[in-house]
Image (spheres, helix red, strand yellow):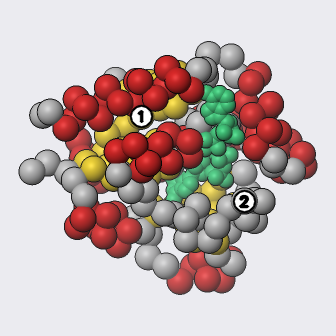
């Protein structure tokens, strides 16, 4: 049976992690956990949200792809993907748009691209504040080239991605349910 990884991408605060959690809770779709050198935020758990690494330990892993985002390293392992697929036909991963393009290149249609966004980008900063991110970290993030890049869906992914506008969480859940149901009934 066909296997797929739902690649959740989009600007910071759009709701990528919220969708990943919902996929797990409602549909039992596990998230492939990636590695990062950024600091753990309040409420985050090592091994659930990320594998938090030092610059030295980060270098020791083997990555399918890795990127720098707002001054920190992020990488996803081949092993994580394969372990997820061993137990499940459908898994998810949260990536930036550069990583998503690599996944599409490496995995073809097995990378199911979902671009999570909002119709009014000014809400993103408010969401990051509400999430409890430190204000210095928010400002650094909002001014990074990667954040600005991911505010729009890159041209090379435009025809391939499902766009999910996450303005209203109740509506988003319905859109997510419809996408998963479409796959399950395939
Ligand atoms: N390419 C790639 N991007 C990642 C990986 N892990 C996380 N990201 C992306 O890195 C960016 C920053 O993530 P994070 O620090 O959690 O910030 P957030 O977007 O504000 O939640 C987001 O766009 C994530 O999707 C990875 O392993 N590879
Ligand atoms: N539709 C929504 N309306 C209001 N707040 C939301 C919505 N979706 C997510 N959030 C909240 O916005 C913040 C950022 O969401 P998150 O999933 O962490 O985004 P991302 O992973 O894309 O950075 C979180 O506090 C989350 O609870």
Picture residue at 50% right of the left edge, 48% below the top: 21
Task: Provide residue 76's location: percent of width, then percent of height.
Answer: 46, 63
Q: Is mark 2 within 8 Å of ligand 2?
A: no
Count of number-bearing discs: 2
Q: Is residue 4 left or right of residue 117?
A: left
Outermost residue toward the right in this view:
136
Q: Residues within 10 Å of mark 2 (few under 14, many from 20)?
A: few
Q: Are marks 1 and 2 in contact (CB under 8 Å)?
A: no
Q: Kindly state the secondary structure of the residue where label 2 is placed.
A: loop
> Could you give the CA–CA distance between mark 1 and mark 2, rounded to whole angstroms?
25 Å
Whether residue 100 is visible here, answered yes or no, is no
Q: Quadrant of residue 167?
A: top right
Q: Label 1: which residue? A: 114
Q: Is residue 85 left or right of residue 41?
A: left
Task: Provide residue 173's location: percent of width, then percent of height.
Answer: 46, 29
Q: Is residue 166 left or right of residue 37?
A: left
Task: Provide residue 18's location: percent of width, then percent of height.
Answer: 56, 42
Towards the viewer: 32 or 108: 32
Q: Kindly state the secondary structure of the residue where label 1 is placed.
A: strand
Picture residue at 57% right of the left edge, 79% below the top: 59
Q: Is residue 146 above or below residue 52?
A: above
Q: Is residue 163 above or below residue 3?
A: above
Task: Provide residue 104's location: percent of width, then percent of height.
Answer: 33, 45
Whether residue 116 is visible here, answered yes or no, is yes
Picture residue at 70% right of the left edge, 22% below the top: 121
Towards the viewer: 53 or 91: 91
Q: Label 2: which residue? A: 43
Q: Residues within 10 Å of mark 1 (few under 14, many from 20)?
A: many
Towards the viewer: 71 or 120: 120
Outermost residue toward the top in this view:
119
Quadrant location of the C terminus in the rendered image: top left
Q: Is residue 85 above or below residue 114?
A: below
């Amino acid at each position: 049976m066909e296997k797929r990884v739902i690649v959740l991408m989009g600007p910071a605060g759009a709701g990528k992690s919220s969708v990943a959690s919902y996929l797990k809770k409602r549909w039992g779709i596990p998230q492939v956990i990636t590695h990062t050198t950024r600091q753990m935020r309040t409420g985050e758990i090592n091994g659930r949200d990320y594998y938090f690494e030092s610059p030295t330990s980060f270098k020791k892993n083997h990555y399918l792809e890795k990127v720098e985002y707002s001054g920190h390293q992020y990488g996803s392992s081949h092993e994580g993907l394969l372990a997820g697929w061993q137990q499940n036909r459908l898994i998810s991963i949260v990536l930036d748009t550069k990583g998503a393009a690599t996944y599409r290149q490496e995995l073809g249609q097995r990378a199911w691209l979902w671009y999570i966004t909002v119709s009014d980008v000014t809400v993103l900063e408010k969401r990051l504040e509400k999430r409890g991110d430190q204000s210095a970290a928010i400002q650094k993030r909002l001014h990074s080239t990667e954040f600005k890049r991911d505010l729009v869906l890159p041209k090379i992914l435009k025809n391939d991605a499902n766009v999910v506008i996450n303005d209203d969480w109740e509506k988003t859940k319905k859109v997510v349910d419809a996408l998963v149901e479409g796959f399950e009934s395939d």
